[in-house]
């Protein structure tokens, strides 16, 4: 499909100022972000982000104005692989910050001191802590101002002079020849590393950097409902910027441990509950674990394996809106006994007899008949007439077949389970 015009996507004129582009992006992103109920649209949000990425960058914009999409091909960021849902619960400004750096905030901070680096911390938390939230403390090492020289980088009494190469600006201009012609690139002054100053005697503690690595603890709350990949942003908990620049931020990346019993899918918790064969047929009560502790669960008579029971409101609270909660889904699996005592065996055989069920295909019917092969299997049960003599079939079973083979035949037990199932209307669910 042909790409839409970036100006059209943002809804701005071709003469729009960077401020207008920023404003347009911010207001549209608020509507289109995939987390927004109703108006959220992931594809449109990605398209919008790509348009902003190009038009807010003066160089890319110039190329786009001149050559259209071709001009910025390979030079645009692809937003296709980004899972925006992992930002659930975070403001649009945080998201913009992560993808476009400080550009949106400061709108060009030329000349001013650079903020320090954003830091990342991977935090592993327990399954239940992700469900209910938890208070945490992390210890990180980050750059802070050197206290010996108060961040100047100069030893006491040392002279600080202006850098000759850049005249104290900290940046130099360089002419770059490229496929698109000549352009001027502004880069950090290599002589003073952007400091704009020359220090005669550097501070010994920080070697003239003005910054030193220090260990710090940060306390924060992990909100209820976070998932693996969720990020928590601690403002100004990152590195200190050089030359008096502000602190960067610290991003806590959440990793949730797996639970031995529960499997989580968004707000929903899945739980597998095996039930006995008799309970499946007769119904009853069981105790199941939930994130709120153990709860009583009623099993209806005639429950099939694979039945799902919804335990309302026992799932995960929604991130940012903990009053809304998902459900716990209990998946019931009927367990077939694998070892039978002789008494149990007799009872089941008796039951098969009562239900006029044959457990074997009669020898003369064992050859597949014309039509579907399944019809051969169905036949003995369907035609369970008195002349089939189920007791005789039972005797044959013992004589003809190896016992271990019999036990492992799943279809046999399925049929016995079938025996226990109530017919329509036979049992009413209370
Ligand atoms: Zn310089
Ligand atoms: Zn120092």
Image: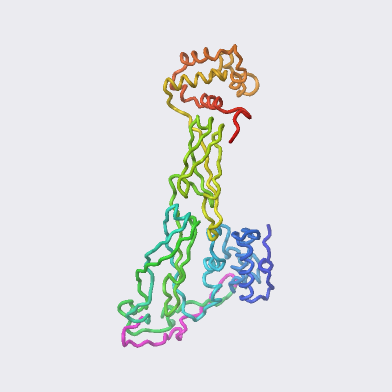
- The residue located at (64%, 75%) in the rendering is 20
Principal secondary structure, stretch drawn in magenta: loop
Q: Quadrant of the N terminus?
A: bottom right
Q: Position of residue 401 (x, y in %)?
A: 47, 17
Q: Quadrant of residue 371?
A: top right
Asked if residue 189 lies left or right of residue 24, the reply is left
336 in relation to 150, above or below: above
**Residue 169 rendering spot, x and y as whole percentages:** 47, 83
Ligand 2 lies in which image quarter? bottom left
Along the viewing direction, whichever of 400 and 354 lies nearer the viewer = 354
Is 398 located above or below residue 83 in the figure? above
Residue 292 image point, x, y percent = 47, 50
| 372 versus 184 height, above or below | above
- Residue at 66% x, 71% y is 66
User: Foreground: 385 or 231?
Assistant: 385
Instruction: Give coordinates of residue 179: x percent, y percent.
Output: 58, 70
User: How is the rendered protein coloured?
Assistant: rainbow
90 vs 112, nearest the viewer: 90
Q: Which residues are magenta?
A: 153-180
Which of the image's four quarters has the C terminus?
top right
Marks counted in the figure total 0
């Amino acid at each position: 499909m042909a790409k839409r015009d970036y100006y059209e996507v943002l809804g701005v004129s071709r003469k729009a100022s960077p401020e207008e582009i920023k404003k347009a992006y911010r207001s549209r992103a608020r509507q289109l972000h995939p987390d927004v109920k109703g108006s959220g649209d992931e594809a449109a949000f990605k398209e919008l982000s790509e348009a902003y990425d190009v038009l807010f960058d003066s160089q890319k914009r110039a190329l786009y104005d001149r050559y259209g999409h071709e001009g910025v091909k390979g030079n645009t960021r692809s937003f296709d692989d980004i899972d925006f849902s992992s930002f659930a619960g975070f403001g649009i400004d945080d998201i913009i910050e992560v993808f476009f750096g400080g550009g949106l905030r400061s709108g060009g901070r030329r000349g001013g001191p650079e903020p320090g680096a954003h830091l990342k911390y991977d935090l592993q938390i327990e399954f239940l802590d992700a469900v209910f939230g938890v208070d945490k403390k992390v210890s990180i090492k980050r750059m802070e101002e050197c206290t010996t020289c108060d961040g100047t980088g100069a030893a006491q009494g040392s002279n600080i002079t202006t850098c000759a190469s850049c005249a104290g600006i900290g940046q130099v201009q360089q002419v770059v020849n490229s496929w698109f012609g000549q352009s001027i690139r502004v880069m950090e002054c290599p002589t003073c590393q952007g400091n704009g100053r020359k220090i005669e005697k550097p501070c010994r503690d920080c070697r003239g950097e003005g910054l030193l690595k220090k260990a710090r603890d940060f306390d924060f709350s992990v909100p209820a409902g976070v998932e693996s990949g969720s990020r928590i942003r601690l403002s100004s908990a990152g590195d200190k910027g050089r030359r008096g620049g502000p602190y960067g931020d610290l991003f806590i990346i959440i990793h949730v441990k797996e639970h031995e019993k529960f499997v989580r899918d968004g707000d929903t918790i899945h739980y597998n509950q095996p039930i006995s064969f008799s309970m499946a047929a007769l119904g009853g009560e069981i105790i199941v674990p939930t994130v709120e502790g153990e709860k009583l669960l009623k099993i209806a008579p005639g429950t099939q394996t694979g039945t799902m029971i919804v335990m309302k409101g026992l799932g995960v609270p929604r991130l940012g809106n903990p009053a809304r909660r998902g459900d716990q889904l209990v998946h019931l699996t009927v367990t077939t006994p694998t070892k039978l005592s002789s008494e149990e065996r007799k009872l089941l055989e008796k039951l098969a007899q009562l239900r006029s069920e044959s457990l074997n295909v009669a020898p003369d019917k064992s050859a597949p008949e014309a039509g579907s092969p399944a019809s051969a299997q169905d036949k003995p049960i369907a035609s369970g007439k008195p002349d089939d003599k189920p007791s005789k079939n039972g005797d044959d079973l013992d004589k003809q077949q190896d016992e271990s083979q019999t036990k492992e035949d799943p279809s046999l037990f399925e049929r016995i389970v079938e025996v226990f199932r109530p017919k329509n209307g036979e049992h009413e669910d209370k």
